[in-house]
Amino acid sequence: MLRLIAVAAGVVVLAGCAAPQTSTVTVLAAASLTDALDEASAAYRAEHPDVEIVVGYGGSSALAEQIVSGAPADVFFAANEATMQTVVDASLAVDPEVLLTNTLELVVPAGNPGEVRGLADLADPQLVVALCDPSVPCGAAAVQLLDLAGVTASVDTYEDDVRAALTKVALGEVDAALVYRTDVAAAGDAVEGIEIPEAASVVNRYPVALLADAADPAAAQEFLDFLRSAEGREVFERAGFVAP
């Protein structure tokens, strides 16, 4: 009898020493959120070491299609409301909320070798110009902005997401591109930004939502609550995003 009690007590001790269970929250997010969302995720992990945040970045439209096609994810953070609506229409997004806004800016390599001065220069066939593909939010916004300014751009390459366009500028592969102002800030000294007055009329609204098929909805909701909190919003504001 004494031996049995000792074994049972040993089991209790071992159970008490077991490692805490770790939850994983998988987020699919617009490429323009990369730096700010990475920082926000790290801040959340510092306060919640038992939660792993895994983020996949890309063009919002492609991510929305992946979700509708059954890609496993817990949270979707899009760069415009149209792509979120695709997920809503499939009954896969729970109560989307617009958390941030962003606007476009003209970006050129450091030193501005193409001597670009404004939107009208994008019509110059002598310049190498990159835009986001019109199917993704930054591309759709670029089309709207160019139409508003009455400029027909001479486009040499269409990119799948805004970070791909930004990379081509930073590497000096193109003379100019239209990206979000937050991306210009994130690139630092590798690029120069040129503000566009008309950009204030073309605002991208970034909705975020819990997904209906979330593997751990409670953990995902807690992370969403953090993003919506004053601490989370401060991270995005430092990156140049604006509250709606």
Image: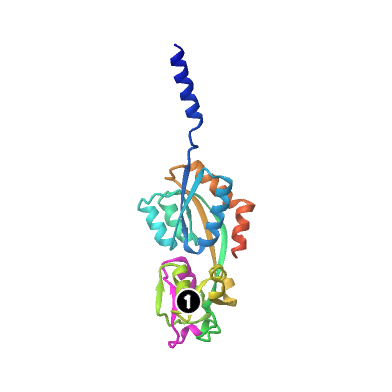
* Front-most of residues 154 and 164: 164
**Can you say whether 17 is above or below 200 in the image?**
above
Q: Is residue 131 visible?
A: yes
Classify residue 36 as left or right of residue 89. right
Q: Amino acid at mark 1?
A: Val
Classify residue 47 as left or right of residue 68. right
**Can you say whether 50 is above or below 85 in the image?**
above
Residue at image coords 40%, 74%: 158
Residue at image coords 46%, 79%: 172
**Can you say whether 85 is above or below 166 in the image?**
above
Residue 210 x %, y % = 49, 48
Residue 121 x %, y % = 50, 85
Residue 160 x %, y % = 40, 68
What kind of colouring is applied to the model shown?
rainbow
Magenta segment boundaries in residue numbering: 121-142
* Front-most of residues 147 and 224: 224
For disc 1, the marked residue is 169
| Dot 1: element | helix
